[in-house]
Image: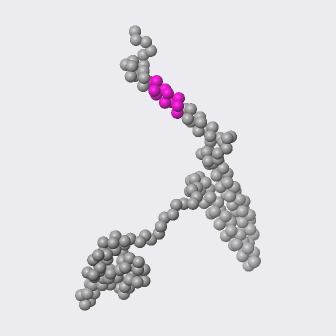
């Protein structure tokens, strides 16, 4: 079946390939194995006039979105995690190449073993970096709800600063509204 036939273009005999599709029908049930496009209404015989409005509005979604079970990782933590995964992947590849070179008796075996050891150290550092970055982010952004949390003290200090700024703005607004342009006395 060609593209023109699937799209409903006129065939050689002048007939057009269109069909009526049941909303519950699968793609296999339609002629030619193709589903009708979701945006277009299907053309059908006149005996289905009563059901036509319902069938034209029927739209079966490709997938149903479900709410995420866990919240997304913060950007710095995700960056560190991606970096760690890449380091671990490279380390595993180097270890496999070192093993294969050793089995083959290649001159490349010794340099690969040395680079695998260095990569193992780097991969360990990357995994620790994820943990440290996560702990730092939690501490700074107040996710950890502990009385001695640094984030809580920082939030408290920011609130005090904002209150002082608002109080100063209100005082300036009162002085201006009295008609004095910053004068303390009316002499």
Bounds of the magenta span? 162-172
In terms of secondary structure, what is the magenta stretch mainly? helix
Is 71 magenta? The answer is no
Location of residue 90 by image quarter: bottom right
Q: Is residue 107 above or below residue 69?
A: below
The residue shown at (73%, 73%) is: 99
The residue shown at (34%, 70%) is: 57
Q: Position of residue 184 (x, y in %)?
A: 44, 15
Which of the two residues, 182 or 146, is positioned nearer the viewer here?
146
Q: Position of residue 161 (x, y in %)?
A: 55, 32
Q: Is residue 171 above or below residue 65?
A: above
Location of residue 88 by image quarter: bottom right
The residue shown at (65%, 41%) is: 150
44 relative position to 159: left or right:
left
Task: Name the image quarter holding the N terminus.
Answer: bottom left
Q: Position of residue 151 (x, y in %)?
A: 62, 42
Residue 111 in view in this figure = no
Residue 152 in view in this figure = yes
Is 170 magenta? The answer is yes
Outermost top residue: 187
């Amino acid at each position: 079946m060609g593209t023109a036939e699937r799209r409903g273009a006129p065939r050689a005999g002048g007939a057009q390939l269109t069909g009526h599709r049941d909303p519950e029908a699968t793609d296999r049930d339609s002629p030619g194995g193709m589903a009708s496009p979701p945006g277009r209404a299907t053309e059908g015989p006149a005996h289905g006039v009563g059901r036509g409005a319902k069938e034209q509005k029927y739209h079966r979604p490709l997938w149903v979105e479900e709410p995420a079970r866990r919240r997304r990782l913060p950007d710095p933590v995700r960056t560190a995690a991606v970096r760690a995964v890449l380091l671990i992947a490279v380390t595993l590849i180097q270890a496999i190449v070192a093993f294969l070179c050793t089995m083959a008796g290649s001159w490349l075996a010794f340099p690969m073993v040395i680079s695998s050891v260095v990569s193992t150290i780097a991969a360990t550092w990357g995994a620790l970096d994820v943990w440290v970055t996560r702990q730092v982010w939690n501490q700074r952004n107040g996710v950890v709800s502990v009385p001695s949390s640094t984030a809580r003290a920082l939030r408290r200090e920011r609130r005090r600063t904002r209150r002082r700024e608002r109080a100063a703005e209100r005082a300036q607004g009162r002085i201006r509204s009295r008609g004095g342009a910053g004068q303390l006395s009316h002499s």
